[in-house]
Image (spheres, coloured by chain):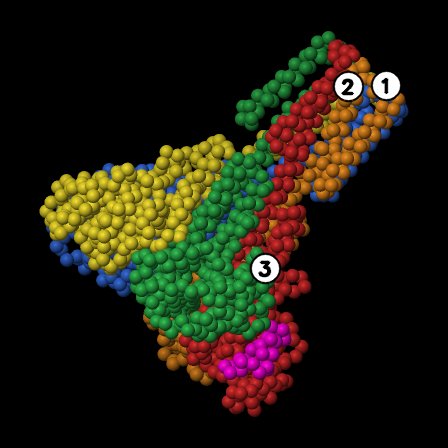
Chain colours: A orange, B red, C blue, D green, E yellow
Amino acid sequence: MKRISLKKISKKTGLPPGSLVHIGEQKAEKTEITVFQYDGSKIHEKKIKNIREYIPLKDIQAVTWIDICGVDKVDTINDIGTLFELHPLVLEDIMNTEQRTKIDLYGEYIFIVMKVLSFNEKKEIVSEQISLILGEDYLISFQEKELNLFKPLKERLKSKDCYLKNISADYIAYSLIDAIVDSYFTILEQLGEEISIVENEVVTDPGPMSLNKIHNLKRETLFLRKSVWPLRDVVYNLEKEESALIRKTTIVYLRDVYDHTIRIIEHIEMIRDMLTGLLDVYLSSVSIKMNNIMKVLTIIATIFMPLTFMAGVYGMNFKYMPELEYPLGYPIVLIAMGVVGGSMVLYFKLKKWF
Amino acid sequence: MKRISLKKISKKTGLPPGSLVHIGEQKAEKTEITVFQYDGSKIHEKKIKNIREYIPLKDIQAVTWIDICGVDKVDTINDIGTLFELHPLVLEDIMNTEQRTKIDLYGEYIFIVMKVLSFNEKKEIVSEQISLILGEDYLISFQEKELNLFKPLKERLKSKDCYLKNISADYIAYSLIDAIVDSYFTILEQLGEEISIVENEVVTDPGPMSLNKIHNLKRETLFLRKSVWPLRDVVYNLEKEESALIRKTTIVYLRDVYDHTIRIIEHIEMIRDMLTGLLDVYLSSVSIKMNNIMKVLTIIATIFMPLTFMAGVYGMNFKYMPELEYPLGYPIVLIAMGVVGGSMVLYFKLKKWF
Amino acid sequence: MKRISLKKISKKTGLPPGSLVHIGEQKAEKTEITVFQYDGSKIHEKKIKNIREYIPLKDIQAVTWIDICGVDKVDTINDIGTLFELHPLVLEDIMNTEQRTKIDLYGEYIFIVMKVLSFNEKKEIVSEQISLILGEDYLISFQEKELNLFKPLKERLKSKDCYLKNISADYIAYSLIDAIVDSYFTILEQLGEEISIVENEVVTDPGPMSLNKIHNLKRETLFLRKSVWPLRDVVYNLEKEESALIRKTTIVYLRDVYDHTIRIIEHIEMIRDMLTGLLDVYLSSVSIKMNNIMKVLTIIATIFMPLTFMAGVYGMNFKYMPELEYPLGYPIVLIAMGVVGGSMVLYFKLKKWF
Amino acid sequence: MKRISLKKISKKTGLPPGSLVHIGEQKAEKTEITVFQYDGSKIHEKKIKNIREYIPLKDIQAVTWIDICGVDKVDTINDIGTLFELHPLVLEDIMNTEQRTKIDLYGEYIFIVMKVLSFNEKKEIVSEQISLILGEDYLISFQEKELNLFKPLKERLKSKDCYLKNISADYIAYSLIDAIVDSYFTILEQLGEEISIVENEVVTDPGPMSLNKIHNLKRETLFLRKSVWPLRDVVYNLEKEESALIRKTTIVYLRDVYDHTIRIIEHIEMIRDMLTGLLDVYLSSVSIKMNNIMKVLTIIATIFMPLTFMAGVYGMNFKYMPELEYPLGYPIVLIAMGVVGGSMVLYFKLKKWF
Amino acid sequence: MKRISLKKISKKTGLPPGSLVHIGEQKAEKTEITVFQYDGSKIHEKKIKNIREYIPLKDIQAVTWIDICGVDKVDTINDIGTLFELHPLVLEDIMNTEQRTKIDLYGEYIFIVMKVLSFNEKKEIVSEQISLILGEDYLISFQEKELNLFKPLKERLKSKDCYLKNISADYIAYSLIDAIVDSYFTILEQLGEEISIVENEVVTDPGPMSLNKIHNLKRETLFLRKSVWPLRDVVYNLEKEESALIRKTTIVYLRDVYDHTIRIIEHIEMIRDMLTGLLDVYLSSVSIKMNNIMKVLTIIATIFMPLTFMAGVYGMNFKYMPELEYPLGYPIVLIAMGVVGGSMVLYFKLKKWF
């Protein structure tokens, strides 16, 4: 997956900066726009097909959240850019879904890029990009496709509960970020479950596949880590930045998100350590297995080589071998063989080889 | 244990921030509240069943310590929140017993989360969460269940000794933190003892179980480390923060706690290094064992293969084999075999193989 | 390659600082100079053979970009130095193509050294050095040889598009840096492809060559890393430096370049982790292969050693061996051998050895 | 040793902070106190048995150094605390000989804890604690038992040499610290000698004991490192701290001590790297040894197995085996065996197996 | 070498600070002093035997460079110390040739210690110490013995070239430092050559000696690293320090030296990474070799064990073994043996074992 993404980025080499080109898979069939407006007492929800339909709504003095699903249409993104006077680089970053998590401060607005992670059917972690533009009294969110993640928030907004009193653009932004960060715990949980499955396998029946699984888990953890680390800086900057766009009451909540981020990072580091430990256990169990194979070989060889030699001696065809004539020669040799073999077994027992 | 905790957290995904949901096992059957009030000359202890019983006590001008055991009742926590005007996120964090150690400064009060660690019957380290709220002249402590840790302090408070003179909310807070930090030494000691047991085992009789034990100890150390590292920042911030809530005389004591924390961290790092060293010794002893097995095999094979070949030669049925007719053929061959075998043994002795 | 470079540098030991000596391979046959001048409305392009031809153009009030291909002629570099009053150390660094990526601020101008990377036919990463001198209204770029990298920019400059309005020396400098940084993505992509080829090989058919390939890839990654890390500081300093030479509008673009640099670095670190993982998988698969060889040996030996012993016993020449006389002796022994061999096979089947 | 120390610390859990309990072995039989007073022209030395004997001396306007050997008597420490108005935590730390190296600034005086290291008869590094209290014109030093380390300094003080002119409390403190730091070089030297012994052993005759020795050296180095690292901060803080207690002329000397500390730390890090390298060499030489054993086995088996098979063929009892009848059959087979064996040996020679 | 140095340092334990004792080997037979004086128009060179000869020259208003070869004479060093009013610790550090690279600022002058590295005949890196004292208009350099390193500079000074115009004490100091730093490139180059020799050996014919060589190279790199790392801080401090002793024009040159230092450090880190990689390749090639040995053994055993067993069966002496009577028994068995052996060989061919 990572290779493909680079392929796409390198295609852009040579284009002037700020060129709008969609990078990434096309995930949504058409762009869907939902506008939430809060006029101080009530929330108005409106689905529109084209951002131009929003223009008459723009002058209403109200906190507005515009949620846009689908970022692959150059026209739509361009229109939004013109309407809200966004920098060309912001538009470029929204359309390039291979961005890393980051925060950019542009005086009039704050631009945030985040990643929503999920497992695909091959148990690989895949990411969707969420871009947020937080202005004085508006918030624009861009999703690659409609995610379930924001539904509970939308429901809460529409219902008449206590949160209605203190709705502000930055609080909605916080709620979205909080939802994304909380979703990482689900990923960690799934990863943890897979690790404990592999752990069981390694302890009970380690095979060549176990190594592959550990390797894959390590890779997924690396990918997860790469996605989450910059998040810490984003939330930290958001919290510390003395921007007029973020109110003091919201900062307390951002601090809480920051705590969650730290916990996620600590968990990822712990998972990495556990995987390294698992690899050690695997490699060691492979070497113990080999040890056991060697033991079996050595025991068998050590018991039968002397016996075979003895049998070989009395299989020689010398004319004058007095033992061969003794009536008790055969049973005596058999007993001698038993004694040699038995003492070998005893020796191994004493050495605790089996 | 760690996996389960994440499962519970991820359940909360989708809830609005500040929702009061108890996360973690229910450890106390009912909430117990103990109030200590110091009116400048005497300590009054009172056990109450409901925090509302405290309301009449609130207006008394006295240093107050409220110790609450059991954090799973939403009502109780909510009542306390209302009474002391606490932020909803503080209440949320108190009930979520999977918090990490942290300190949050809210102008009017300081909120501290700490972990008390202990070994359970499976020799795993488990943690109980302690939350502290330090205000101007009050301290509220929340425990998941009644811990023995605070008993000596309570006894000291009740007895009429020299400490009565300088009781203040921040000094009580310090005493609690000090008790928690000191309890980590007990954990380290137990861990150290287990390590020395495994160390003995690895040196005298390393088996596949030793590896598992080292692996488990590593895991416990990782968990311990994760719990203790943030503690350093908490104590450091508490000491450096120029808050009106912490008096200068108390800061000297906090510096002492900070020193203890550093020592604990250094010990943990040393334990980690020792465990890594132990793993090296284990792996090496496994490989030395294998070496020895190979040696035995090689010695046996190298002695008996030539002998068996010699016996084989004289077991051939050629008509014209002059040696077979010699009367001394048999004893000569036996002697030759002895010479070959003996020189092999000598060779190995010279090579110091045994 | 790295060794050669050092050889050349060490040759310079003993020379006074600021001596102009070309270090590196001679890549361009002759020095080519292209001058772009923008007089506020139009771009004038002029190819000149000698920098002195530029002198009459110097006094025109226009944004000027001088692109110089070939840095091995001491005279040319010296002339440019005199014309633009450059510090001797700057000239020395331009001619020494083994510089590391860096930025030097000299009040009147900024001196930047960067590396353009590409794969040579041996799949080794090789680097070309680009030096930039950014002055008030001029930009001088030095290339070791004509690179395709800057062609798209030159085309854009010549065409009449929207960029003409805000052409400034610093914006051209940014465009060049952006082109170089973007070209790194191509390198990463190629490296990623090679890694996935080797990965396939290691998983399906690991041989001694795989190790060599991993080793070589690691080396290339090390080299790449060494080239890219200092780039971060260069772009960071350029962005943060409150120099009058860089306009505010350009800084926004530099921040974008900085983001790209960070992404490249993260990718390199990820590639390193992947290569380490690959090495682990390789070593483990080698040890698994050895395990299998040992298994085959042990199975064969364990089955045939007892059988050969049994055959040996009945090959002994004792006079009185009653079994030899039994008519059914031979088939019974054959069956006994079958039972022993069969039970050995069964034992290994149960132990899941094959 | 480290485990024991923790046991003792954990015993203190539950005691109120500032409780005076001696932690550590009792090393001195009785407390010995020596007082040096410098009245500007002459040094007066006086041995006293009880610190109370010092009280009349206290009012003399003179630079005073009080050297106390033995820190296990609560009364003595308490008396000193009262006399010099020391903080209870300082007294607690003096008696707890398991402190880490540290510096605490208490306005009126500076409290320093340091470690004197030495090898015991088991070649383990053991540590003695030295505590220093540096006041305006007095220095109090606490040793667990009389160490030889300070003797040269005492001699110098008593003799009439040039140092008499600029005696001050901080200069004496510096001299003590300098003596302690210099003593670390002796430890490093001894450690270095032991390493070079083990190195020799590993190169010439590596055995299972070598690994144990490397492991022990690693452990000692870890312990040494743990003791020395905090020293850097102590000396650094002492040097940088703009305390009135430390004169400018002394700071130059402290900078010198700081340099020594850095060199010691660098040496320790180098020793660690060397030990890691030694472990690599050991493990590799073990694996090379195993390789050689395998070679011997393989050579023997590969030579004799075909030969034994050939002998076996002509040992078969078929009636019609024409070769058996040939008069030259036997010698031909013997020659054939020689050829097979010889070509095997040749093959191994060509493959450079021996 | 490193051990010896410590031995010498530890001898100094117990001496008062500032004691002049020469530490290190005596490298120069007698102390040689060369004085360069630049009176604004011309350079005067004068060789003197005793520093006292310099006293009359001292009052001349001229930039002076005094180059002293040999630092083992206490008297000479003492005389210089008195003449230039140097701190006793500076004199001590000059004579102790086991100093680490460092810079000390003493208001009136700057004291710099550096290391000149070279390979001795055993291909070990050895170091010579250079101490510089940079004053207002004088520079004193101390060498352990006459090094060739400074000769080109002396030549340049004596010749009448452009540099004469801006001679100042700090510029000469810079020139010396530059010469030393440049000499490190030669060391790196030699190290690089040795590495590529060992690399070749490891790839073509790895033996036990290769490991030793890698180990030695690692050690040399460690030593080199230890010498170069502090250099960075020295040059950085020199460049950043706003000292009146260093002119602005010189700072530009120091920045260039700083760049070189960074490049050297990067190279050393790269060499370390390469050596680690080489070790991996070596260990892996050893394990591949072992694999091949095991394969040969297994192939031989697997082919001949069944054949020997078959021969054994027909070597049994049962009376009633019908096959033995068949005229074609013998050739049939031989063919059967050929089939069994051949199919084994085929099986290994299919498994790509050879």
Q: Inspect the image, locate mark 3, and give the three-letter code of the amino acid beneath it.
A: Ile
Q: Image height check: is B57 above or below D117?
A: below
Q: Over which residues does the magenta segment extend?
A: B140-168
Is label 2 on the same chain as label 1? Answer: yes
Q: Inspect the image, locate mark 2, and give the three-letter code of the amino acid beneath it.
A: Met
Left or right of D348: which side holds C67?
left
Disc 3 or disc 2, which is closer to the eye?
3
Pick whichever, D82 or D195, lies toward us.
D82
Q: CA distance from mark 3 to mark 2?
A: 69 Å
Examine the image and state in which quarter residue E129 appears. top left
Rendered-image quadrant of the N terminus of chain C: top left
Q: Is residue A300 magenta?
A: no
Position in image of residue A206 (x %, y %): 64, 48
Q: Earlier in the sequence, mark 2 or mark 1?
A: 2
Q: Secondary structure at mark 3?
A: helix
Rendered-image quadrant of the C terminus of chain C: top right
Is label 3 on the same chain as label 2? Answer: no
Left or right of E97: which side holds B52?
right
Q: Is residue B148 magenta?
A: yes
Q: Secondary structure at mark 2?
A: loop
Q: Which mark is residue A325?
A: 1
Q: Which residue is mark 3?
A: D4
Q: Which residue is mark 2?
A: A316
Q: CA distance from mark 2 to mark 1?
A: 13 Å
Pick whichever, B267 or D116, lies toward us.
D116
Pick whichever, E291 or B133, lies toward us.
B133
Q: Image height check: is D127 above or below A180?
A: above
Disc 1 or disc 3, which is closer to the eye?
3
Query: Looking at the image, which residue is at 66% across and 79% down?
Result: B30
Query: Looking at the image, which residue is at 50% across and 60% down?
Result: D145
Q: Image height check: is E190 above or below E23?
A: above
Q: Residue furthest top?
A: D327
